[in-house]
Image: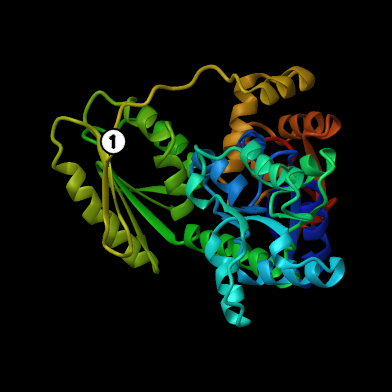
Amino acid sequence: MTIKIAVVGSADFIRTILSVVPQIGELEIEPYIYERPEEAAELIKYLKPCDAVFFSGALPYYFSKDLHESLPIPSHYLEQDETAVATSLLAVISQKNISLERISIDLTEYVFIKNVLADIGVKREPIHVIDYADKLPNKFDINDIVHFHYSRFKSGKIDLALTSIHAVYNRLRELGVPAQRMVDPIKSLVRGLQDTKAQAELVKSHSATIAAGYISLKQPEEAQTLYLEAFAREMNASIQQSAESAFSLYSTRGDIEIVMNSDAFHEFLLKWEEPVAVGFGYGFTAAEASQNAKIARSFALQHDHESCGYILTEEKELLGPFPKEKKTQRLKNDHPELLRIAKETKMSPANLSKIIQFSKSRQSVQFTAADLSAYLQVTRRSTERILKKLVDHGFAKVVGEEMTYQQGRPRSIYELNMPIY
């Protein structure tokens, strides 16, 4: 199974990353390029469907921390270490024939260079070094790093600046300061991508854990059954009546968590005048998930005068009650990119929001027209018209075909090409 990783970094970093991807296999890269690491926070707002995010270093990672921590996918960054520092110093000293005392260096942590010198038996410490780990993210200013190198070069203290920040390198070159970028060893890049891929695979496996649910109603009616069926579709679940006033459903952990962390569960509870008790359970088997769901529902039943839900995980961790706070439905979509998409495709913001929610609810970034049709509860022809609009304007793309067991043409496999997070 191919894992799709969004890589956030400079143009040079992206080029290097693309060159090592063939060493890993079953990996697709979606590049997001910045001029300065502070721009990473804005780029995160425009992420298209992917399985994980990989940052070129600590700077873009910490500048966008508040945003990427809210994503339903894992984030990872290339950590600077002694290998990168040793490789970079070897390149400078051997190729430029410049002594350590005549080099100014910026890096994440000072201890890296200290350890490298200790390993090779050099007892003296470098004179011109600045680190910035303790300044991330709020106290960091690239201009301080540029000034550090520039002032030492102008005063004749150094002959070359070794920087771990691409934006600093570009600025120093503009100022006429001889500079060299810190090397990202191929081994470190491969390991960083492999770690990110492993995190994505773990999350996908975790999300696929079996989940069961039990819902208790006081007086179920035909209209309420329709509400239940719509709610089940939100989490890609099958539902059946297990008793006169109780219903059971089966889905996956990932689908349940997406619904519980959105407005969907709160809106579901608002449809009943009488209290509704909901319990979800996760397990390694269907029987275990069902048992945990029944236990979770017993906690929800203790809330006599309000509707709520609980989750009991396979580790016997009880979560709830849900919703923990009143949520307000967002009726306006003011993301500039999505407004542009709605205008260009002449699609309603409501339909566009449903398509985005559909993509976020899936464990795979790829889907068929049948998948989307079942989620939107519209005809196959209507779904194909929607997809044609998106494809024609470049907001979706056909990435393959799926053979069917029945007669007829193969079904196209699609992938969204728009920000969804």
User: As shown in the figure, which amino acid type bears the numbered disc 1?
Assistant: Lys
Q: Residue at x 39, y 68 (%)?
A: 285
Q: Quarter of the image containing the C terminus?
A: top right
Residue 115: image x %, image y %?
55, 73
Q: In the image, 285: left or right of 243?
A: right
288 displayed left or right of 229: left
Q: Position of residue 74 (x, y in %)?
A: 54, 54
Residue 265, horizontal then vertical, whole percent:
38, 35
Seen at 40% across and 68% down, the residue is 284
Report the label total. 1
The quadrant of the picture occupied by the N terminus is bottom right
Residue located 60% across and 28% down the image: 353
Quarter of the view holding residue 359: top right
Depth check, front residue: 109 or 41: 109
Crowding at dot 1, Cα within 10 Å, few <14 / some 14-19 / many 20+, comes out as few
Please state which of residues 238 and 275 is positioned toward the viewer in this rendering: 275
Residue 41: x %, y % from top left: 60, 37
Q: Which image quadrant is residue 123 in?
A: bottom right
Determine which residue is flagged by label 1. 324
- Residue 92 versus residue 341 in the image, above or below: below
Tell me if I can see residue 414 in this picture.
no
